Amino acid sequence: MAEKTSTPGRRFIKLAGMTASIAGKAVSNSIKSFNANDEEKLAAKSRLYEDIGLKIADTLGEMKGAVMKVGQIASQYKDIFPPEVAKAIAKLQRQAPPVPFSTIQYQIEREMGKPLDQIFSSIDSEPFAAASIGQVHRAVLPTGERVVVKVQYPGVDEACESDLKQVRLALRLAGVFKIDKKLQDKLFDEMRDSLTAELNYNIEAHNLQVFSTFHQPLDSKVIIPKVYPAYSTRRVLTLSEELGDSIETAATWSQELRNELGERLFRLISQEVFFLHSFHSDPHPGNFAFRPDGSVVVYDYGSTKTLSPELVNINKQLVRAAFSHDIPALEQALRELHVRNYNGQIPAEFYQQWIDILISPLNGEYDFAKNTAHHDAVELLKKSLKYWDSFQPSPETMMLNRTISGHYWNMINLKVKDNFKPLLEEVVPLHSSASPT
């Protein structure tokens, strides 16, 4: 049977309790701060946000399934929430504890319609990976082929919509959103679409086949697991076992090899964005493995994002404007991406300072092990707060920003020291505004 915490009644009670607690904290804080001065109100609000973040993290961390995944997704978009809330729920990105194997066996047999010993020659009872919506077990097919079996927890997909609504209600009652309701709707629609796709393993199986077909002619050292359709359903996905070393192990290899791996990662994602117009959008280092021959194994194509040709072209214009320091073109591209709103005028110097920081890892040889870009960004952010109301989170850029920033940290972890500008120009010619799309 599925875990009791996955039953609709228990889930609702836990989430409703979280919502009520958060609403109570918000009301109490408002009453206590009624006669406080500005400094006291600010300190009280900071404590409130920290309490709210911890309550959300503690509640969602106890629960399997979509609700925990919602918390993980929310924690990745830190510009939507106050820093105290974002920091507390960031721990939801860590690996989840596994469920008993009896639950996994129940799900496989229910999906496949026959006993487990008639499906696989053998299957490990201990998972080698566990996450918010499912876990992965090694197995052997009757043919002798070694595979991995990704199994979704029972009841997770049915809970998705109600989980998302309840988490959003709790956050709204707490007053922690830094964006208006219209933009909240768009961002949560994006989260819901992403989550719904991840919960359908038929979609992931299709994605794996599409991306494998795309990459193989371009680079045989991009390894994407093979799907076994006869052993896969909407909630069970059986794939070829593709082994590789972790990013921590790869970081101990030679500089030349680390650079090769970094270049392969860079080409992989940039070709997906600018050529395929669809990309792997979960850059967590656990979704990649590395081999001493320079190969990169890519796992988990459940989270992908498809871009319209128009959106790809706007991103090309943004890149070209940044490298040519064309501030009017840059601002226009940001407006078309709905990142720059119409609040106030911004001096060219503001953009220039940000351009210098953000393109530095792509503008000549860059040592990611000694990088300063994110430190410089934090310092500049403090000086830029007076212009921050002129910008907003954008559904059009949310997944792409998450992917780019994730791979920036992957390059840091790999300690790459390389010049990515020629690789960038392979997908976005920087000196030709009329280049083909």
Image (cartoon, rainbow, N blue to C red):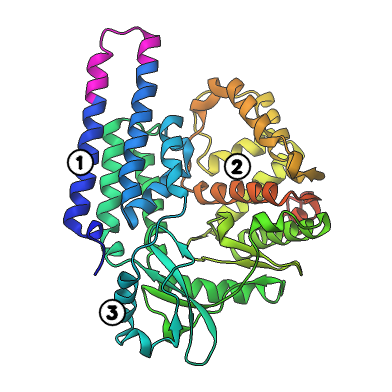
How much space separates mark 2 and mark 1, taking CA atoms?
A: 44 Å
Marks 3 and 2, the one that precedes in the sequence: 3
SS type, badge 2? helix
How much space separates mark 3 and mark 2, taking CA atoms?
A: 50 Å
Amino acid type, label 2:
Ala
Figure quadrant of the N terminus: bottom left
Image spot of residue 340 (x, y percent): 53, 35
Q: Name the residue carrying label 3.
A: 110
Is 51 left or right of 347, judged from the image as shown?
left
The relative height of residue 273 versus residue 233 in the rendered view (above or below) is: above
Who is closer to the viewer here, 222 or 352?
A: 222
Q: Residue at x 72, y 72 (%)?
A: 219
Amino acid type, label 1:
Gly
Front disc: 2 or 1: 1
In the rendered structure, find residue 75 and report the number of the disc placed on it: none
Marks 2 and 1, the one that precedes in the sequence: 1
In the rendered structure, find residue 17 and report the number of the disc placed on it: 1
Query: What is the count of numbered marks?
Result: 3
The relative height of residue 120 versus residue 52 in the rendered view (above or below) is: below
The reply to whether residue 376 is visible in this rendering is: yes
Who is closer to the viewer here, 300 or 7?
A: 7
Q: Which residues are magenta?
A: 27-42
Figure quadrant of the C terminus: bottom right
How much space separates mark 3 and mark 1, taking CA atoms?
A: 32 Å
Q: Residue furthest bottom?
A: 143
SS type, badge 1? helix
Q: Residue at x 32, y 52 (%)?
A: 67
Q: Residue at x 47, y 50 (%)?
A: 94
Who is closer to the viewer here, 422 or 264?
A: 264
Marks 3 and 1, the one that precedes in the sequence: 1
Image spot of residue 434 (x, y percent): 73, 54
Q: Name the residue carrying label 2.
A: 333
